[in-house]
Structure formats: structure tokens, C-alpha cells
């Protein structure tokens, strides 16, 4: 049975080159990937994602994803949500610049000192979202093995199987290794475990808010059945 990979956050950056804010988005994203949170983030290539890249879309469905858009057109966010579900966080550079009171960037290629500083501050903002999404309490930190990756398309696939809910079967990625690790931790099949199981399932799957209750109940039933075997 495969181990669960380390929980990572996907970063989808604006690919637009006609606006300086697009350049700022890409540079800030690279700073997070290479310097600020290299062990906790991977990049998702937006053009490949929109073109139908199976690796990118699968990763975005199974992991929390942050989109970094240059402007209010929200190409990265809308594309991600259209193909892989709701994003965990969204950063819009034009909004960030306005709220910070900084001067709008002017260069699309070589940034000046002020723009480089702004990219650094933006990267710290993105890193803050990463930290928030990776925050887990001690009960939820159940031996996860690291799976190094620089790009979502390099990652492997996790097993998935269906569980029965009141509205029909639902496929859940990584369910078996999740249940195995809770069993190894000797967790009882109670309401506290039901809540923690749901939170772990949501790391690797998009769970619509309106479906959380029924999916949590279905996962707990599977867990109780696995303990009885």
C-alpha cells in the first residue's frame, strides 16, 4: 500500500506578458518556489493545464492550490476552477499593489529596484497563504512521507476507490492509505476521527461544502469496516 506524499501546495501563476503585473506574478511565484517555500510548493504550468495536461489537473484536484493572477481577468483562477474545482487561495497582483499603497509596476521584462522589492513582498504574501494551508494540528499530523517534486506533472498518481453516499457513489483519492494511517495511530471510529478523516481526505480531494457531511459519514463507515476486518 503506498504511503501518502507530503502535503504540498500548488502555485498557478499568471502567464500573461502584456501587463507588468503578469511579470510580477511570475517572479513572486518563482521566489516562493525557489527560496521561500521550496519544500512545500510545486508549480502548475497554466498553459499546459488549460490545454488539458492530466498531471496538472489531477494535482490541482488532490492538493490545495493558490492562483496568482496579474489582473482582474483572473485567467489562472477561472481556468483552475473550471477544470479542477475551487482554489484554496487567490492573489490578484493589481489588488495587492493597490492595497499596499505601492506604485504600480511599469516594466514587463527587467524590474527596477522598487519593483523587485514589490515582488519580494508579494512572494511573502503568497508564502503566508502556503503556511496557512499547511497548518495542521498534532492529531492530524499522521506520518506522511515526502514526495519531492518541482512540477505537478512529475508527480505519481494515488489510488482511488468509490464509497457509497446517500446521493450515490463518490470516488476518493488516497482513501486506503489514509485509513491505514489512522488505524496505525489507533484512532477510534468516533466523531472526532470522522472530522479528522474528512480534513485529511480534503487534502487530496476537492469536497464541495454541501457534501461534507455525507462524505464524512461515508468515510467513517469505511474506516469502521476496516477496523473490523
Image (cartoon, rainbow, N blue to C red):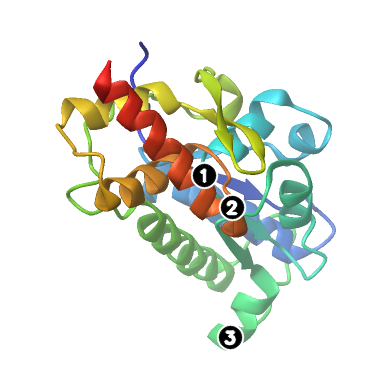
**Residue depth check, mark 2 versus mark 3: number of the one nearer the observer:** 2
Q: Secondary structure at mark 1?
A: helix
**Residue 127 x %, y %:** 42, 58
Residue linked to disc 1 = 215
| CB within 8 Å, label 2 to label 3 | no
Residue 19 in the image: above or below residue 162: below
Residue highlighted by disc 3 = 99
Visible in this render: residue 33?
A: no
Above or below, 74 against 14 in this view is below
Label 3: how many residues lie within 10 Å, few (<14), some (14-19) or many (20+)?
Answer: few
* Residue 203: image location, x then y, percent: 45, 42
Residue 69 horizontal/vertical position (percent): 70, 60
Q: Quadrant of the C terminus?
A: top left
> Tag 2's secondary structure?
helix
Judge by depth and name the residue closer to the eye, 191 or 107. Answer: 191
Q: Is 132 rendered above or below residue 226?
A: below
| Residue 96 x %, y % | 60, 76
Q: Quadrant of the N terminus?
A: top left
Q: Quadrant of residue 110?
A: bottom right
Q: Mark 1 against mark 3, which lies toward the viewer? A: 1
Circle 2 residue: 211
**Considering depth in this image, is 183 or 76 the residue closer to the camera?**
183
Cα–Cα gap, marks 1 and 3: 39 Å
Residue under the point 44% across and 61% down: 129
Residue at figure coordinates x 77%, y 62% from the top left: 74
- Circles 1 and 3 in contact, beta carbons < 8 Å: no
Q: Is residue 96 visible?
A: yes
Q: Earlier in the sequence, mark 2 or mark 3?
A: 3
> Pointer 2: residues within 10 angstroms few (<14), some, or many (20+)?
few
Amino acid at each position: 500500500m503506498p504511503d501518502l506524499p507530503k502535503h504540498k501546495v500548488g502555485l498557478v501563476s499568471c502567464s500573461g506578458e502584456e501587463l507588468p503585473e503578469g511579470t510580477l506574478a511570475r517572479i513572486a511565484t518563482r521566489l516562493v518556489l525557489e527560496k521561500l517555500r521550496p519544500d512545500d510548493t510545486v508549480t502548475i504550468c497554466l498553459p499546459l493545464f488549460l490545454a488539458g495536461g492530466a498531471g496538472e489537473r489531477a494535482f490541482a484536484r488532490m492538493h490545495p492550490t493558490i492562483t496568482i493572477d496579474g489582473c482582474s481577468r483572473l485567467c489562472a483562477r477561472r481556468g483552475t476552477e473550471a477544470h479542477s474545482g475551487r482554489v484554496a487561495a487567490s492573489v490578484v497582483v493589481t489588488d495587492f499593489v493597490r492595497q499596499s499603497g505601492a506604485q504600480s509596476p511599469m516594466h514587463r521584462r527587467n524590474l527596477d529596484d522598487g519593483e523587485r522589492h514589490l515582488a519580494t513582498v508579494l512572494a511573502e504574501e503568497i508564502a503566508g497563504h502556503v503556511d496557512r494551508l499547511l497548518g495542521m494540528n498534532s492529531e492530524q499530523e499522521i506520518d506522511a512521507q515526502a514526495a519531492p517534486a518541482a512540477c505537478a506533472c512529475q508527480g505519481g498518481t494515488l489510488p482511488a476507490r468509490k464509497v457509497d453516499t446517500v446521493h450515490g457513489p463518490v470516488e476518493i483519492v488516497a482513501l486506503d492509505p489514509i485509513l491505514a494511517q489512522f488505524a496505525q495511530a489507533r484512532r477510534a471510529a468516533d466523531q472526532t476521527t470522522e472530522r479528522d478523516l474528512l480534513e485529511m481526505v480534503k487534502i487530496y480531494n476537492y469536497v464541495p461544502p454541501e457534501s461534507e457531511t455525507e462524505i464524512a459519514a461515508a468515510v467513517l463507515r469505511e474506516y469502521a469496516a476496516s477496523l473490523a476486518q
